[in-house]
Amino acid sequence: MSEKNQDGKRTARQRLAAEREKQKSRDKRRRGLIVGATVVGVLGLAAVVGVVAANVGRDDGSESAGPVVAPSGALGKDSLALPAGPESAPSTLTVWEDFRCPACQGFEQAYRSTIHELTGAGKLKVEYHLATIIDGNMGGTGSRKAANAAACAQDAGKFPQYHDVLYENQPPETDDAFADTGTLIKLAGTVDGLDTPGFRSCVKDGTHNGWVEKSNRAFQNGGFSGTPTVLLNGENIYQDRSMTPAKLKQMVLDADR
């Protein structure tokens, strides 16, 4: 075989080897991209899980919450439930909520009229439990201060009305507007008879902050996945994707038969 032919074969083999190395490099990069994307997906899921864990695992961080002063008329274990509707109603709706929580506002907007109808008819009583998970996740004190103000409204016998006003005026989740007691007092002015010196003092002094913190700890220890958590006669109905206001109403009416 001539030297020229040998050189040609060597060149061909070298080209083939080089092409194989390039292909290996391309395959390695592709695998790296796939693995990278998978890692990003897992991290994204971990971030979501982390948010949920933070929701139920972080306190509002206040060391100055003060003594636990339950609002007037609070019910249940450790007096942590704020009632709405007649005590004699055959069904009980238990709601864990945070006044800064957008999903809680969504629940209110969808179900409020039905809940009002059922409580007004004596078919349903509601027990509201207040949490401060958004303070823990987003920072700030608006969840706690709004909850304290709601407890102050309970003292004045105006909790259901003020509860609705807070959700009607809920700021964006990242806006800690409820941390301003002036805002909370201004909103109280829309509830007939609520904006009194006693209410203002209660809001500004954080009279029920210790109670709010205790309620939040009860939420953390309750094994709940987030807010709102809604139970009808002990059954978690918010996780039911087929749940509608009409279905809730029918369940309450059926329970009264």
Image (cartoon, rainbow, N blue to C red):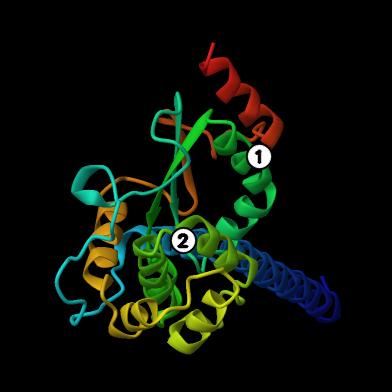
Q: Amino acid at mark 2?
A: Lys
- In front of the other: 45 or 8: 45
Element assignment for label 2 = loop
| x and y percentages locating residue 248 in the rendered image | 62, 30
Residue 203: quarter of image: bottom left
The mark that comes first in sequence, 1 or 2, is 1
108 in relation to 205, above or below: above
How far apart marks 1 and 2 lie (CA) works out to: 20 Å
Residue 28 higher or lower than 255, as above or below: below
Q: Name the outermost residue toward the top.
A: 257
Task: Tell me, yes or no, if residue 38 can be seen here.
Answer: no
| Label 1 packing within 10 angstroms: few (<14), some (14-19), many (20+) | some
Q: Which residue is mark 1?
A: 114
Please provide percent x and percent y for residue 45: 51, 58
Q: Which residue is mark 2?
A: 158
Residue 107 x, y percent position in the rendering? 61, 51
User: x%, y% of residue 68?
Assistant: 17, 66
For the point 40% across and 72% down, the residue is: 149
Neighbor class of circle 2 (other Cα within 10 Å; few <14, some 14-19, many 20+) is some
Number of the front mark, 1 or 2: 2
Locate residue 66: give its quadrant.
bottom left
Quarter holding the N terminus is: bottom right
Quadrant location, the C terminus: top right
